[in-house]
Image (cartoon, coloured by chain):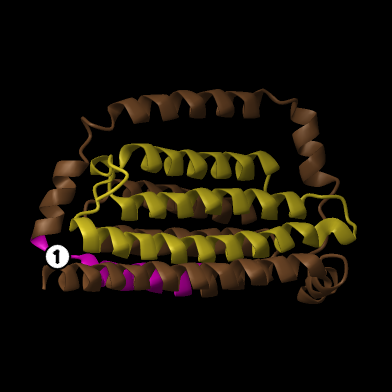
Chain colours: A yellow, B brown
Amino acid sequence: MIPISWILFLSLSLFFIGIFGVLARRNLLFVLISLELMLNAVVILFIGASRYHAPSIANSDGQIMYLLVLTLAASEIAVGLSLVIHMYRQHHHLDLDKLNKLRD
Amino acid sequence: MLATIFMITAAVILISALLTITAHNVVHALLYLVITMLGVSLVFFLLGSSFAAALQIIVYAGAIMVLFIFVTMMLHQGEKSLNQERHLFHFSTSITAFILCSILFAELAYLLFLAPAETLSNMSQNHYSPAITVKQIGQQLYGPYSLLVVISALLLLSALITAIHISKSAENVKNKAEESNL
């Protein structure tokens, strides 16, 4: 039997690792990877909550939210990676701090 | 037994997530990220949602990672980009972010372990429901949640169109620049 506080702690730690990655990295690819980690932390929370819910039909709600988050992550990554390719074609680097002008 | 397996999996997930964030080479970071995804799917298996675990392996560790690796193969320039990345990220530049994150993390962990112990143990022992089958999920998904399926289909379609448009407009910009040079 897994205590629910362990699952909460795992999700919390993974989420803060993701936040650290978003704050500290300046490469656009690494920022996208950190976003993936944060989404995974949220998903662990959903699945754990659906598992420890009182037995009812609403138990599958966590996995349905997981499907929605999966769709969101896939579309976010598709758009984000096409933006990465666009940025590399125009600037020949992936440094986010140098993107401080709105045109050119 | 389950608790031991969960602790080992959680340790693997956290260590490989830290290595993902601190790696300099993008390909190494992606391989560590695959390990993280597989660990998360093992946690799903331990929690009894096998459908979500299978989807995690197929979509995250399969499809999304292939997308990342293709983009990395298009952009990676070996030693040059590695040096660029070493210049962009080292520990002295990320010390502020680390301090801020660890303060927030310590506060939230303190709140988590400050919660009354009876609530947490009640939640984890009295209401341990049976495993959820795929049939239940399908019935829910095409019954009360059918609007959600339509919305996620629209989301995927719009993401597809956006990705095509962004990659194509880069080509157009290049072509127009060449024409104006001529």
Residue at 39% across / 59% down in the picture? B33
Q: Relative to residue A17, is residue A72 depicted above or below?
A: below
Left or right of A44, for residue B135: right
Q: What residue type is labelled 1?
A: Gln
Chain where mark 1 sits:
B
**Point 60% across, 49% down: residue:** A42
Q: Which of A51 and A69 is in front in this view?
A: A69
Q: Position of residue A21 (x, y in %)?
A: 37, 43
Is B62 a magenta residue? yes
> Along the line of sight, which residue is nearer the eye, B51 or B178?
B178
Instruction: Please give the residue where the numbered disc 1 appears in the rendered image.
Output: B77
Residue found farthest to the right = A56
Magenta stretch: includes residue A26: no
Q: Can residue B65 be seen in this view?
A: no
In the displayed structure image, the side of residue B128 where residue A68 appears, left or right: left
Q: Where in the figure is residue A62, as x and y percent of width and height?
A: 73, 57
Task: Tell whether A64 sits left or right of A70.
Answer: right
- In what element is the residue under mark 1? loop
Q: Where is residue B173 in the image (x, y as percent from the top left)?
A: 27, 67
Figure check: B106 above or below A5: above
A72 up-or-down from B153: above or below = above
Q: Is residue A43 visible?
A: yes
Q: What stretch is highlighted in magenta?
A: B60-79
